[in-house]
Amino acid sequence: MNIAFSPCPNDTFIFHALTHGLVPGAPEFDVTFADIDITNHLAAAKEGPEVMKISYAALPWVLDDYALLPCGGALGRGCGPLVLTRSGIEGQGDPASLAGKRIAVPSERSTAYLLFRLWAAQNIPGGAGEIVVMPFDEIMPAVRDGRMDAGLVIHEARFTYQNYGLALMADMGNWWESDTGLPIPLGAIIVRRTADIDREALTGWIRNSVEYAWKHPEASREYVLSHAQEMSPEVAQAHINLYVNDFSADLGKDGYAAIEALLGRAAAEGLVPSFDLAALRS
């Protein structure tokens, strides 16, 4: 069985047991490490491994071919993407100052992007200005150096943006949670519908892998740090603490409600294709 997920600490922490023969009954998994923007496109092209982690924002394009699994992904509170600007600039902290400005984003098929566009529609007169897609690790330097007026950042940038002389304009997570009362849907685990595997069994194996990681955090430490991108052990652990939670083991009522709210709003704004929300559970 083939699986693709990112080298980020939350993913390597969750899938360590599954991919190291520590989950009873699970088959052997061949791992491909790929950032979520890559797996989004692989899924849309109907290519790549049978099991992948993609952005929830990409689901409307792939639900005919892939099923959403109720565990292994990333939802949470207090873990939203951030809109950053340079410290000390005029209008700092005022979303209206971004009208007509250049804003860097890590992807146009990401939850971060959907949250930003929904936030911008409410807070930036006339909506967002020019959107520039660039690798997430290049965004903060581009804002720092003045090549971009603002940047939408994800991952460990939450913990390091001050090192670039940047200031927080808005926390998309705080906005979303205050607006909806729901957690933020970030990364989804999907399986190809035609894959020769029992979906219920796969769900159980992934859930067992999450639970093993919680019970034996030391077992995955070397694996996590070996794949973390220039990240200290402290930052890697903060990353895990933020993104691995009860929703990683089971989406539950609030998890599904959050996904439906995000994608339903995005479809109404024309940001994603319209689709039957019932497909999220089938």
Image (cartoon, helix red, strand yellow):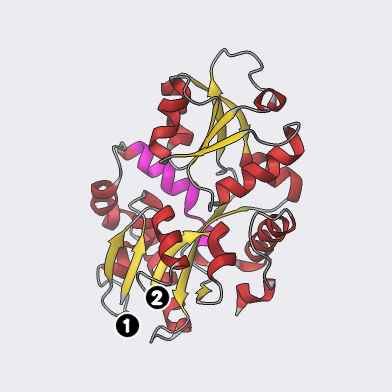
- Whether residue 60 is visible, yes or no, is yes
Q: Secondary structure at mark 1?
A: loop
Q: Is residue 212 left or right of residue 114?
A: left
The label shown at residue 205 is: 2
Q: Which residues are magenta?
A: 234-248
Horizontal arrangement in the rendering, residue 53 relative to residue 172 (left or right): left
Q: What label does residue 267 carry, if any?
A: none
Answer yes or no: do the residues labelled 2 and 1 have beta carbons within 8 Å?
yes
**Residue shown at the point (43%, 83%) measured from the top left:** 201
Q: Quadrant of the N terminus?
A: bottom left
Q: Is residue 152 above or below residue 90?
A: below
In the rendered image, residue 82 lying in the magenta stretch gets the answer: no
Identify residue type, mark 1: Gly
In percent of width and height, residue 179 lies at 75, 45
Q: Residue 173: where, in percent of width, then height?
A: 62, 43
Q: Residue 163 in the image: x percent, y percent?
A: 41, 22
Mark 1 surroundings within 10 Å by alpha-carbon count, few (fewer than 14), some (14 through 19), many (20 or more):
few
Q: Earlier in the sequence, mark 2 or mark 1?
A: 1
Q: Main secondary structure of the magenta part?
A: helix
Residue 141 at what x, y percent from top left? 41, 26
Where, quadrant-wise, is the C terminus in this rendering?
bottom right
Q: Residue at x 70, y 55 (%)?
A: 270
Q: 172 or 208, which lies in front?
A: 172
Residue beneath the point at 47% across and 43% down = 106
Q: Mark 1 — residue?
A: 25
In this view, the residue in front, 59 or 254, is: 59
In the visual, does 185 lie left or right of 143? right
* Quadrant in the picture for residue 82: top right
